Every structure is written in C-alpha cells, then in structure tokens.
Image: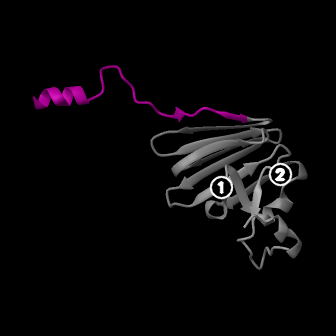
Amino acid sequence: MLLAMAVLAGPALGQTRVGAQATNPVTCGALKGESSRNESTSQWTISGPSGKTTETGVLKSGPRFECLDGAILTLEFASTAGHGVFEAYFPDGTTISYGRQQINRRGGRVVLPIQAKARIAAPWRAAFDYHCRLDMPADPIPASARGDCIF
C-alpha cells in the first residue's frame, strides 16, 4: 500500500517541472507590464516609449498591474519582509513610487499623498485622489494644496 502511494504521489514518467509561470501581460495605452514567477523569485518588466525596465525580487505578493484611465500603468507588490510598494508609470516616462502604507483606495480610486500631484503631468492628475496625511518637514504640504485633499 505504501509503495503504491509513493508511486502515485511522484511525478509521472516524462513529466517535467514547470520553471517560470507567466502571467497575462497588461497593456495600458503606450505602456505594457509583464511578470513571471519561478519557485523563489518574481520578475517583472515595464515597457513604454522611454524604454524597457526589468526587475527581479523575492516577493510575498504581486506583482499586480492595473491600468488607470487607459494610460497610467500601476504596479503593486510586497517583499517577503512585508514592505509594500506602489509605482505609477506615465506615458511621458515619469514614474512615481511610494510605500504601500502611504497609498489608499477609496471608491475604486487610488489616493496618493498630495505631494505627488505636483510630480504628475497635468493630463493625468485627475486619475487620482489625494490625501494630506503625509506632512513631513522635508516635503511639507503647501496651504494652497490642502483644498485638493479628500482627507
């Protein structure tokens, strides 16, 4: 009985182990995100008009891509240490990146720190909502910007 269980539990003759498992690529206007995962690492690639960037890491979750307003490609992942990352890639080649604890989602929309608004080109600012919770001495929130914060 044990021998039969051992034989049935093992791989069938001629079967090979799957190395990298690809996910469906996400195309978002001029940008494209792709990822793959093997036993221990994940690899993701962002392609767009300004070139192609590939990164590799040992992740707890993700990478997860999302397309905002048909033009902005977002990427979220968490490292095995639990540090979450949010990145947004824009068609003009600009990228913004924040720790996941600084990003919220409310009503299906991404809520960024208000300081991000000035770093995003005008055509794409409306794709996000903004909060005023990240007031730091090195990156203060101007009084004039507080009216654009939802909380």
Task: Kindly give the residue lying farthest to the left in the view shown.
Answer: 1
Q: Quadrant of residue 1?
A: top left
Total number of numbered labels? 2
- Image location of residue 98, percent across then percent down: 69, 60
Q: Is residue 23 above or below residue 63?
A: above
Q: Quadrant of the C terminus?
A: bottom right
Q: Is residue 129 above or below residue 43?
A: below
Q: Which color scheme did the rendering employ for the protein? A: one colour
Disc 1 marks which amino acid? Answer: Arg
- Image location of residue 83, percent across then percent down: 56, 61
114 on left or right of 33: right
Residues shaded magenta? 1-27
The residue where tag 1 is placed is 105
Residue at figure coordinates x 66%, y 64% from the top left: 102
Task: Kindly give the residue lying farthest to the top in the view shown.
Answer: 14
Asked whether 11 falls inside the magenta stretch, the response is yes
* SS for callout 1: strand
Residue at figure coordinates x 30%, y 20% from the top left: 13
Q: Nearer the viewer, residue 73 or 47?
A: 73
Q: Quadrant of residue 72?
A: top right
- Image location of residue 80, percent across then percent down: 49, 56
Q: Is residue 89 above or below residue 27?
A: below
Disc 2 marks which amino acid? Answer: Ala
The residue where tag 2 is placed is 126
Mark carried by residue 64: none
143 on left or right of 35: right
Considering only order in the chain, which callout, 2 or 1, is on the residue closer to the N terminus? 1
